[in-house]
Image (tube, rainbow, N blue to C red):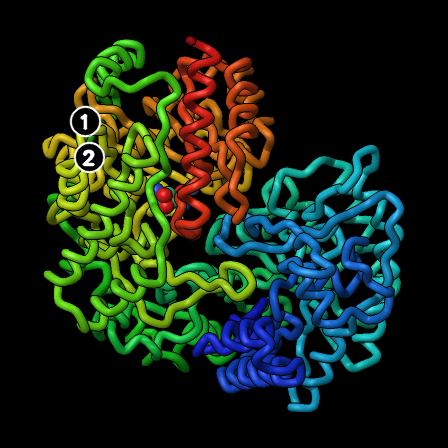
Amino acid sequence: MVLSTTLGFPRIGRQRELKKATESYWKGEISEKELVETGAKLRGENWRLQQEANIDLIPSNDFSFYDQVLDMCAIVGAVPPRYDWNGDKIGLDTYFAMARGKSGTGAVTPMEMTKWFDTNYHYIVPELTKDMSFNLASLKPLQEFREALQLGIRTKPVLIGPVSFLLLSKLKEDSFDQLDLIDSLLPVYEQLLRGLSEAGAEWVQLDEPCLVLDQTPEVLRLYRKTYDRLKQAVANLKLFLATYFEGLRDNLNTALELSVDALHVDLVRVPEQLEAILSFGLPEGKILSLGVVDGRNVWKNDFEQSLAILERAKSALGSERVMVSASCSLIHTPIDLELEEGLDDEFKNWLAFARQKLHEICVLTRALNEGHDAILGELETNAAALGSRRSSARIHNPAVKTRVGQIRPEMSRRGTSFKERKQLQDEKLGLPKLPTTTIGSFPQTREVRSMRQRRRKGEVNQEEYESFVKEKIRQVIELQENIGLDVLVHGEFERNDMVEYFGEQLDGFAFTRHAWVQSYGSRYVKPPIIYGDVRRARPLTVDWSRFAASLTNRPIKGMLTGPVTILQWSFVRDDQSRPETCRQIALAIRDEVLDLEKAEVPIIQVDEPAFREGLPLRRSDWQEYCQWAVESFRIVTSGVKAETQIQTHMCYAEFDDVIESIAAMDADVIFIEASRSDMELLKVFTDFKYPNQIGLGVYDIHSPRIPSSEEIVELLMKASRVLRPEQLWVNPDCGLKTRSYEEVEPSLRNLVGAAHRVRQALWG
Ligand code: GLN
Ligand code: ZN
């Protein structure tokens, strides 16, 4: 028999129950008991849902009150000393303190958070020190296994594998090798696995996604040693090793030879992996779990294509050695398509969310076990749905395809050098040295948010809404003039989420009402779905920028989001390559740039905060990505005249990997986050001799703190010693949308004051 399995199911609840419960708990509105009960209820629902769908191996411990890597820290007792943990079992308060920090008495900073591979999920980064010890400090996997067993379901507990756990951590002191900790870490895993086995577990899933990354021979050796040891310690427990998000490539033979009972591979990202595995040979007795249903996107599976892959595996390996699954955990997809009453039937028929994917996995499994005839009806409806999508006029716009086909190299070149442009722009803009500006958004007060919401619900009409936004723009222009900023913005009051804002106005994007996906902790996002050729039917932002410009004699900048970021933060088409979709978006935004120029907006900023996170997981793929990502940005920005200034913004400080691409984007000015890194990143920009202008963030907008003029002066002096002072701008790290005016106004005054003092000091 071929078995079906999943690697994990969304834990947030159909109605975002987990968010509501955790946030209420944090506010003290519900008790720990109530929170714990909500968790149990959600787990029970998920198990039952999967059981009803006919999934054979159902995961447990995929539930988490915050994050699965943080759970793993708790399980192995990797609690940094600042949380004053007494060494007993870890309670919820210590757990949440690690996740979120604590303010007031006993204030403590949270652990760091970073992106989970190339997804938009963020995990808590474990902290390692040389002499730390581990011990089994949370019995969560055991408790949840027993909880499911009581409901009659023998689950497959999921753990982060020990090698990935170490590799995903950060070192809190140098001069040691994190891999050395494996000897003290493994006994805890062994103890836990033994416990699970005694409790009745047959399978345990160990996630080792680091196996898809570039690894040294030393790491690969450690993988072998680790799994040999684990297998020896718990010989009667079956180990299911999960890899996902990329192919195993040069790590394939290591993965195949590990002492485990089943290996899971992502055949959505890399379908060719199967042939590589079969030709290398799957060692005797081992099971291959085939991730054929896309665990990270929202499209209906192509049964015909999946069955071809599955049958190939089955005929080569036999039924007993094949499992059917999703490519990765389903936590990266929304829960249930049935909730989307707002979507029309034709469109809905192209989609599958987590719950629908369970059904897909089981139908495919059934086809393998009972023959394709057993699912004839399913095969027909599936083919019909896919056929309707392929040929739909809603998806295909010949004009867009023709236009992309006609992109010429000149369209992604400014035509004049930076030096020439700079001179023309200086003449036109008449800015002082060290010009001051912001990144775009001003505080989104309750008033602003509620007005947008009321417009959405139809409680205010378009006219009332527009006059409200205009009044806000008027106020923010006056404020900026009063503070003395040099380049002004309109404040972005009309936007909630920027990708949503642009997507809503472009053809080819769809929006859902309930399709939430966890981003981190209790923060969920609702990414738009790019389903068709992207086209801009009418100007998007021009009226707001033109209105802002009419209110002041100072230069205004237009505010747009770049194509790479829009692509990165959406569910994308799977019937067309990412670069192709990115170029379509680029052409749409290019039209907007040209219309802004026509409306005499002298400066246009195109934000690309997601540029770096789009980097592929393997270094050898970076160049290709950078090439099309940079080209897309340049398609957007290269149509304008030399005197129109192009600016961009990226809100992170790790530029080592992408500095060349950033220079190749050839923006006249780039604004980056810098205040927290104490200008360390300057080194990257100076080593590389970054040619164009740079605004280094001197105000940390992630903190409520108001920076003093003195400290900003110091940062600017530091910067001006390594970069040419003529290159520099003065600005906050990122948009001000999450801050309050009480913080923003004095901070910006100090920023402007500091710029004046440094101008005085440098040029007299
Ligand atoms: N212009 C945007 C803002 O100021 C940029 C947002 C971002 O970098 N994520 O809000
Ligand atoms: Zn930013």
Counting from the top left corner in percent of width and height, residue 308 is at 43, 61
Residue occupying the point 68% across, 45% down: 253
Which residue, given by chain and number where applicable, does mark 1 sit on? 639
- Nearest the viewer among 277 and 602 is 602
Cα separation, mark 1 vs mark 2, equals 8 Å
Q: Quadrant of the C terminus?
A: top left
Counting from the top left corner in percent of width and height, residue 571 is at 36, 56
Q: Quadrant of the N terminus?
A: bottom right
Whether label 1 lies within 8 Å of ligand 1 gets the answer: no
| 136 lies above or below 712 | below
| Secondary structure at numbered mark 1 | loop
Quadrant of the rendered image containing residue 320:
bottom right
Amino acid type, callout 2: Val
Q: Name the N-terminal-most of marks 1 and 2.
A: 2
Amino acid type, callout 1: Gly
Which residue, given by chain and number where applicable, does mark 2 sit on? 593
